[in-house]
């Protein structure tokens, strides 16, 4: 397969200019943020100055002049947080790193490839940050009466954890295997937790840099379940013998005041792109937008904090079984419990945001950071009402970001016919470039084919149909996604030998709170390799209950998530789903 890119057929084409800054050791493009063309909802700069259409809108780190070397410091190859006590509330400490596994299901690895390979691309995937307005009236904390993990003791610290993850990415001086400069970071959805404007502002500030106060309602204090006195929630500031303290959770005087203090994020020091998830698109990640009563409730002065186990079970089952996509039953439940609600401070910042508002927020110059403008999204997306796009990763590699959310409701996804055809055309138009596809949902969680209310006549397509399309293009190497909060890497092959890897990465809200570095290399022997390496945040593994600083709380965020009652213990995946070398035949 020729490696000469065939994007000249685009109406405006790719303005190549002098985009390569390769060293003798590695051929890595130093320019990223390309728009293949500013049409068809593809990424495009909104600048109107002298820069020509399609020119780079951001720059990655420059390739160093010295020979590149692997950089494993701060990755899970070097060490992983692990429990150092055996019972009760378990304290974390430094544990041994995870080894790398070579996976050969799709191609046989050939000896000597390490000495031959050249790097095509290197980037970071962040997923399921779930930046959370923990005091938001719409939250379903009371489901804990039937499912103990429906509320987690660390939820007030999501911003602290995300900033610490940004700090870790910034500290990586090169890719773990090749030492290549990292081109960009991609967030694969559920950047926010509850489709709240407050959360969206926090997410964009964390990623691009600035000061964040993770508090809404009363600016002077926290108002929520953790100072409610209700024993089903951890009450950190009091000596109340709540359910979590009975499991060993600590009494931390001043925790809530510290949790809502102003924080500073350095912002990522490399370009970053954004992919939308169901929690970004819909209240609670499952209810279609449009109910005016729920929108008023979100910004109002009442909050339900407790519910009987039987009612909680009924509500949870309704959500899981996709019986209330518009939130009608949820609204009726809240209305029935108006007298049981507690008073909180109203706040307009908690209002749900629309898809157009999501795009406009990304395009806001205040959140540009190191670029690109819009972080993948463009004014073309606004005009077309879409949230998918393509961009150039490196000279021979394109990226494609999909919108797999179903606006009709429910947390599982699908894509419409127009997007499926766009995906097929984008891959055909760039058949001489390798392709990395990004989405929020995995192939197995795209079974929700309810029509989009904005396009009621358009058919929706499930994950198996997307697999079939991707397998029909020899240039597709990987489908990178999240949603399931678990590390899981799956090979996909077609009868004619075409194949790609599906790479699903754990969330940063549930332990083990990971991101991934992904490196694409040409082994110069008829095969390619995708290296995946998991990274934790920069917070120390050990915590200090007396340290309620920004760093101390980030460390506590990890330890609390490890101890969260009812938390799954398999989200790290098996060793073959973590640090890997995924071998592929060239198309």
Image: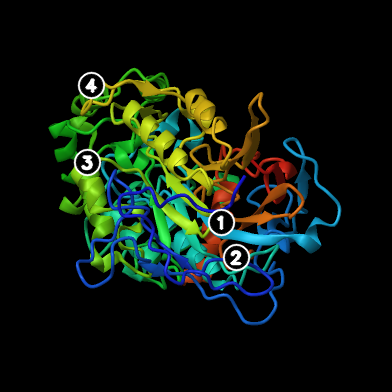
Please tell me how crowded label 3 is: few (under 14), some (14-19), or many (20+) other residues with Cα within 10 Å: few
How far apart in space, not on screen, are marks 1 and 2 (Cα)? 9 Å
Residues at badges 4 and 2 in contact (C-beta under 8 Å)?
no
How far apart in space, not on screen, are marks 4 and 3 (Cα)? 16 Å
Of 55 and 332, nearer the camera is 55
Q: In the image, is 163 to the left or to the right of 194?
A: right
Image quarter for residue 505?
top right
Look at mark 4 in the image and give the residue it sits on.
Answer: 456
Residues at badges 1 and 2 in contact (C-beta under 8 Å)?
yes
Residue 240 visible from this viewpoint: no
Residue 538 visible from this viewpoint: yes
Q: In the image, is 119 to the left or to the right of 457?
A: right
Check disc 3 and report its element: helix, strand or loop.
helix
Please tell me how crowded label 2 is: few (under 14), some (14-19), or many (20+) other residues with Cα within 10 Å: many
Q: Residue furthest bottom?
A: 65
Check disc 2 and report its element: helix, strand or loop.
loop
How far apart in space, not on screen, are marks 3 and 2 (Cα)? 48 Å
Which residue occupies 22% across, 59% down? Answer: 218
Look at mark 3 in the image and give the residue it sits on.
Answer: 384
How far apart in space, not on screen, are marks 1 and 4 (Cα)? 43 Å
């Amino acid at each position: 397969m020729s490696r000469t890119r065939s994007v000249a057929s685009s109406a405006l084409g790719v303005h190549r200019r002098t985009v390569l800054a390769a060293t003798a050791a590695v051929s890595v493009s130093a320019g990223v943020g390309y728009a293949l063309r500013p049409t068809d909802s593809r990424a495009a700069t909104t600048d109107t100055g002298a820069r020509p259409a399609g020119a780079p809108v951001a720059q990655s780190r420059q390739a160093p002049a010295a020979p590149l070397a692997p950089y494993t410091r701060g990755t899970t190859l070097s060490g992983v947080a692990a429990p150092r006590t055996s019972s009760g509330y378990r304290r974390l400490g430094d544990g041994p790193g995870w080894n790398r596994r070579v996976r050969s299901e799709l191609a046989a690895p050939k000896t000597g490839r390490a000495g031959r390979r050249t790097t095509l691309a290197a980037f970071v995937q962040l997923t399921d940050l779930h930046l959370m307005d923990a005091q938001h009236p719409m939250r379903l904390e009371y489901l804990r009466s039937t499912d103990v993990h429906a509320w987690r003791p660390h939820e007030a610290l999501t911003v602290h954890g995300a900033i610490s993850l940004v700090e870790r990415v910034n500290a990586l001086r090169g890719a773990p295997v090749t030492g290549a400069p990292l081109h960009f970071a991609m967030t694969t959805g559920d950047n926010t937790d509850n489709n709240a404007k407050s959360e969206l502002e926090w997410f964009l500030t964390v990623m691009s840099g600035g000061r964040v106060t993770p508090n809404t309602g009363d600016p002077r204090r926290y108002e929520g379940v953790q100072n409610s006195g209700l024993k089903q929630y951890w009450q950190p500031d009091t000596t109340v013998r709540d359910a979590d303290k009975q499991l060993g959770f600590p009494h931390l005087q001043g925790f809530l005041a510290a949790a809502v203090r102003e924080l500073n994020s350095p912002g990522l020091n490399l370009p970053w792109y954004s992919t939308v998830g169901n929690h970004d698109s819909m209240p609670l990640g499952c209810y279609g937008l449009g109910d005016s009563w729920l929108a008023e409730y979100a910004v109002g002065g009442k909050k339900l904090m407790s519910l009987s186990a039987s009612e909680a079970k009924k509500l949870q089952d309704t959500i899981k079984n996709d019986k209330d996509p518009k939130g009608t039953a949820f609204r009726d439940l809240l209305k029935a419990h108006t007298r049981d609600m507690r008073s909180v401070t109203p706040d307009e910042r908690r209002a749900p945001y629309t898809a157009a508002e999501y795009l406009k927020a990304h395009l806001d110059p205040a959140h540009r950071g190191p670029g690109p403008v819009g972080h993948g999204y463009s004014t073309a997306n606004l005009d077309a009402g879409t949230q998918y796009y393509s961009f150039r990763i490196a000279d021979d590699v394109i990226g494609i970001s999909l919108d797999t959310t179903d606006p009709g409701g429910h947390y599982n996804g699908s894509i419409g016919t127009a997007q499926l055809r766009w995906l097929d055309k984008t891959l055909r138009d760039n058949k001489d470039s390798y392709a990395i596809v990004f989405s929020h949902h995995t192939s197995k969680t795209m079974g929700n084919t309810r029509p989009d209310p904005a396009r009621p006549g358009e058919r929706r397509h499930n994950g198996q149909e997307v697999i079939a399309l991707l397998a029909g293009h020899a240039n597709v190497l990987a489908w990178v996604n999240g949603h399931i909060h678990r590390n899981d890497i799956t090979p996909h092959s077609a009868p004619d030998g075409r194949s790609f890897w599906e790479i699903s990465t754990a969330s940063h809200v549930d332990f083990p709170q990971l991101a991934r570095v992904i490196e694409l290399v040409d082994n110069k022997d008829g095969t390619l390799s995708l290296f995946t390496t998991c990274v934790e945040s920069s917070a120390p593994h050990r915590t200090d209950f007396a340290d309620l600083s920004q760093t101390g709380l980030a460390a506590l965020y990890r330890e609390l998530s490890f101890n969260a009652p009812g938390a799954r213990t398999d989200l790290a995946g098996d060793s073959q789903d973590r640090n890997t070398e995924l071998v592929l035949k060239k198309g």
